[in-house]
Image (spheres, rainbow, N blue to C red):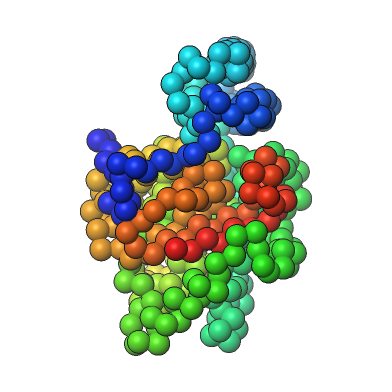
Amino acid sequence: MKLEPFIKLRDPATYQACRWDMRVDHEARTYWVEFFKRHVVTILDLALEMATVRGQDMLEVEARVKACRAEFIETYDRFDRQPQGSGRVTMLTLDEWRDAMLRKHGFADPFEDLKHRENEKVIHLLPAVCRQIDALDADDQFRAVIEGVFAGNIFDMGAAGSATLLLDGKLDFFTTRARLPARPWLIDDFDQFSARAASRAAADRAAWRKCVFFVDNAGADFLLGAIPLMRWLAQRGTSIILAANERPTLNDMTVYDVRRWWPRVLEVEPSIASLPITIISTGTGEPLIDLAGVSPELNEAARDADLIILEGMGRGVESNLDAAFSCDAVNLAMIKDTMIARRLNGKLYDVVCRFR
């Protein structure tokens, strides 16, 4: 698939997905190299668990795990020692190195079973979340769906704190939603976002004609956070382009995961079946997203979009926090990493609602 710049970028020539350059940012390079080396252990443990469940030849799988871990550590250590030898290196680059090595050693989607378990665990809760939203006054519904996105976004295997809680079964959507930080949030453009929606709706039209919604993690993030927001917008006349990764990465929903689970979504929450929601591949395959290269299919669908939603810490904070678009755009995320929080002058589990 030949990728092309996202059609809604204001200026593709000056766009940069990630501002951090790890070649010159010593603090960030040291932190992230060590993080990725620790995190790959978790990933390969999940790969071993999957192989065991599937009855694969464990000696062969363990040999691949060993080889992958050795290459991984050597690659990241070499970059740490010689940061000027790899061209410009950002968080996106580190993600690309990791996923390429996993695929090279035969671990294309080590989170497949975990994604399935998390989806299975929460899908029956989707109707309850929708009924809770529907029961609110009109003025309260918009904030409720935004807070649901924040609460769902904690279900993230790409951040150390949330990954541990997720694997230990200690995350709960409703508890997280109830304990969200009080406003003002770390980045808080909610009033502007809400006013934009209300002012357009007051003119007897949909607040936005078409929204491109870049989704993030499986489980509660997708099913209890992203889908209720898409439903709320679509019920008010906004066509939704549900944009998901082409290739697997961490516990992010791929376009194939979304299509596989969509019949179940419609089964448990029939109100979604008649809504204008179209599932499209971004053409990408990382937890961050480089909008310098997306699928032609996405660009064709997004041609007349007037709202972009970048959901999640990877797509909306580690990349694209300051991206400029030719239409309305919002970044929605929970901060689940201490380094990211520190760079934003915030704290762990702060939330971001940036509207422009």
Tell me where residue 37 sits by quadrant.
top right
In the displayed structure, 141 sits above or below 231; it is below
**Which residue is located at x 48 percent, y 39 percent?**
18
* Residue 315: % across, % down: 49, 47
* Residue 55: % across, % down: 59, 25
Q: Is residue 215 left or right of residue 11?
A: right
Q: Is residue 31 left or right of residue 146?
A: right
Quadrant in which the N terminus is drawn? top left
The answer to whether one can see residue 298 in this image is no
**Which residue is located at x 30 percent, y 63 percent?**
305
**Which residue is located at x 29 percent, y 57 percent?**
302
* Residue 264: % across, % down: 48, 60
In the displayed structure, 144 sits above or below 45; it is below
Quadrant in which the C terminus is drawn? bottom left
In the displayed structure, 98 sits above or below 266; it is above
In the displayed structure, 274 sits above or below 247; it is below
